[in-house]
Amino acid sequence: MRGLFVTGTGTGVGKTVVAGAIVAAVRARGQRVAAYKPVVTGLDDRAAAGWPHDHELLAAAAGASAEAVAPHRFGPPVSPHLAAELAGVELDLEAMVVAASAAAAEAAADVLVVEGVGGLLVPVTRDRTVRDLAVALGFPLIVAAQPGLGTINHTLLTIAAARSAGLTVAGAVMTPWPERPSPMERSNRETIDRLGGVPVATLPVLPDGSPRSLAAGGAQLPLDVWL
């Protein structure tokens, strides 16, 4: 089965929007697609208007239930291992891999899109990280990054961390990409492409997190190359 693992350079960099855009665009093509996010935290925080919580956005994009997309859901806006500890729950990375396969099988999916939590080195258990999960799944990586100041360092570090574990970085996506990017934003994109050896796509500002908006944005991504 084909698949992609979407990670980010950190928290709040548009990772869910990128993952949702991929899912919605693949589905709009008539392909069967499943989405999986092993852990969601921060549900105590109110989502922005027009933007559901991460697992709800992915579920709508895939035409699935939010519970199937994200089996572990926590209220506090903290890292997964701490959220689980506070809830008295023990997370297991191998079980997450099994759950990802089960989500794809239940949807009879041709493509599985997995979204990580935060950045690659965020712990999902006390001693295992998002990177460990990505390695266990074995899918090519898509790195979501912001276009502004600081993104060169954060993105190149993420690419280096991925490659040091043997992961294939298929591409990066800068979002939200402005209609009229500044010289700095254009330079950031070119520099990451050149120094990271990774093609950098862009995803524009979307009006909301609906499947229709996500699919329109995702149609601009190089899905044929990635998949």
Image (tube, helix red, strand yellow):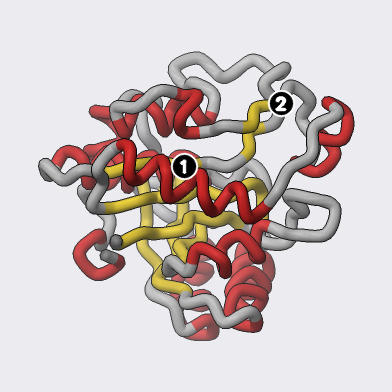
Q: Is residue 201 above or below residue 193?
A: above
Q: Residue 90, how many percent across, how many down?
A: 79, 39
Picture residue at 33% right of the left edge, 24% below the top? 210
The residue furthest left is 30
Q: Residue 144, how many percent across, how many down?
A: 51, 55
Task: Give residue 94's quadrant in the image.
Answer: bottom right
**For mark 2, does the 10 Å Cα neighbourhood hold few (<14), some (14 to 19), or many (20 or more) residues?**
some
Q: Is residue 171 left or right of residue 109?
A: right
Mark 1 → mark 2, Cα distance in angstroms = 16 Å
Q: Residue 127, how many percent across, how many down?
A: 83, 59
Q: Quadrant of the C terminus?
A: bottom left
Picture residue at 67% right of the left edge, 73% below the top? 157
Residue that carries the numbered disc 2 in the rendered image: 74
Q: Residue 107, how many percent across, how many down?
A: 29, 37
Depth check: give the residue in front, 28 or 101: 101
Picture residue at 55% right of the left edge, 56% below the top? 7
Q: Is residue 142 left or right of residue 74?
A: left
Q: Are marks 1 and 2 in contact (CB under 8 Å)?
A: no
Depth check: give the residue in front, 65 or 198: 65
Label disc, if present, on residue 36 of the rendered structure: 1
